[in-house]
Image: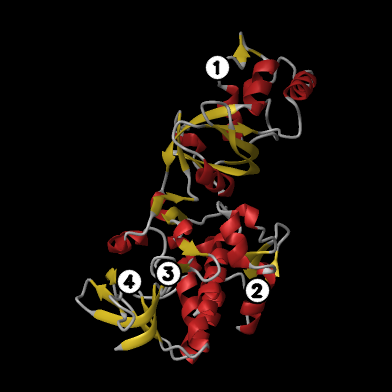
Amino acid sequence: MIYDVIVVGAGASGLVAAMSAAKRGARVCILEAKNSAGKSILTSGNGRCNFSNANLDAGHYNDPEFVTTVFGPNPKETVTKFFESLGLWYITDEEGRMFPRSRAATSVLNVVMNRVKALGIEILYNAKVQYAEPPQDKQESWKIHTEEGQCFQAGKVIWCAGGGSSKYLSNLKLPVVHEQKTLCPLAVTPKPPKYLNGVRAWCLVTVSDNHKKILFKETGEVLWRPYGISGIVIFNASRLSHPGDTIELDFVEEKSEEELKNDLDKRLLTFDDRSDIQKDFLEGVLHPALSDFIMHLPGVIKDKHIDTACLAHALKHLNYKIESPADTEHAQITKGGLDTKSFDANTMSSYEYPTFYACGEVLNIDAPCGGYNLSWAWLSALKAADSI
């Protein structure tokens, strides 16, 4: 069977690219390695699918110049109009994150799949692509070979197979930026004690390299795990940090260290000799387990008395060394991939192979949590389909 367009991957970008190409009259087939479509949609936003953001500024992305061209002048309007045309109702929270009104990721996937089915788009599941063979001349088609020995042909290919899939394109010799799982927890040293597992705290997180250069700074909720630390703010830090960097937690962002020491001195006056000061001094300030951990740091208690200067420093500067990304099996994205320098941002097509298009996570484009990565998937797919 020879198609007009073969889309590799039935994730967010693949489904939208196929749908948009089919609406323009193309005969489209999607090859999907898994046994169902849209699994990345279902797992996003903790199952609620934060499908976009009200602030789609290109500055959130690692290659803002390329993204600006792909997005066009009104990216938010493009995304919302697209989903409104599918019948999706949505809400926007105080941070600008956009969710289906049902708060269920299935709602996003269902409205997309309903349109895919209505357009008669063929999806072949468990089709594990092995490599893409380019046409030898203008009269030939692309040949997509699968591990099962099948060969599918099309005049144009839209590659939407996700992060890490550039390895199946090695024969095309397209430049690839080093790929790494990210938006995930971080393993740190020293390892947190087991009793902190599951404890959460709101704090300012700063990542610095060995030269004290600040690589990341953001406030959010940190979650302790036996291997290190997690939480959305840590996921965002993982994009911009490296093994050996220092990650610092400030539990009292609103006060300077001197102001905090003065407040701790005043607090100390409220305790009498009968109080279990080591246990109770930070009651109501931090989770009890975290309070216990901080109070037992070296120097905080001297001769059964609290050193408020040392305690203030500990609350403002709890430092860890980053070992590596952690729990990468559940990482939200893969950064790196096909180098955007090899692709035309106006069409999403390869300069080397003008009938080969790439969208979504396979390209070297990434952003923090908050709907930005899914927005890239939708908009890059719409751009490719427009050019086809």
Quadrant showing the N terminus: bottom left
Count of all numbered marks drawn on residues in the image:
4
Packing grade of label 2 (10 A; few <14, some 14-19, many >=20) is some
State if disc 2 and disc 1 touch (CB < 8 Å): no
Identify the residue at image location x=65%, y=37%: 204
Packing grade of label 1 (10 A; few <14, some 14-19, many >=20) is few
Of marks 1 and 2, the one in the foreground: 2
- Indicate the secondary structure of the residue bearing disc 3: loop
Residue type pointed to by label 3:
Cys
Identify the image's colour scheme: rainbow, by chain, secondary structure or one colour: secondary structure
Q: Which residue is mark 1?
A: 298
State if disc 1 and disc 4 touch (CB < 8 Å): no
Residue type pointed to by label 4:
Ala
Packing grade of label 3 (10 A; few <14, some 14-19, many >=20) is many
Q: Position of residue 323 (x, y in %)?
A: 42, 34
Disc nearer the start of the sequence (4/2): 4
Residue type pointed to by label 2:
Thr
Of marks 4 and 1, the one in the foreground: 4
Looking at the image, the residue that sits furthest to the top is 303
Residue 92, image quadrant: bottom right
Q: Is residue 33 left or right of residue 41?
A: left
Q: Which residue is mark 3?
A: 160
Res 330 visible: yes
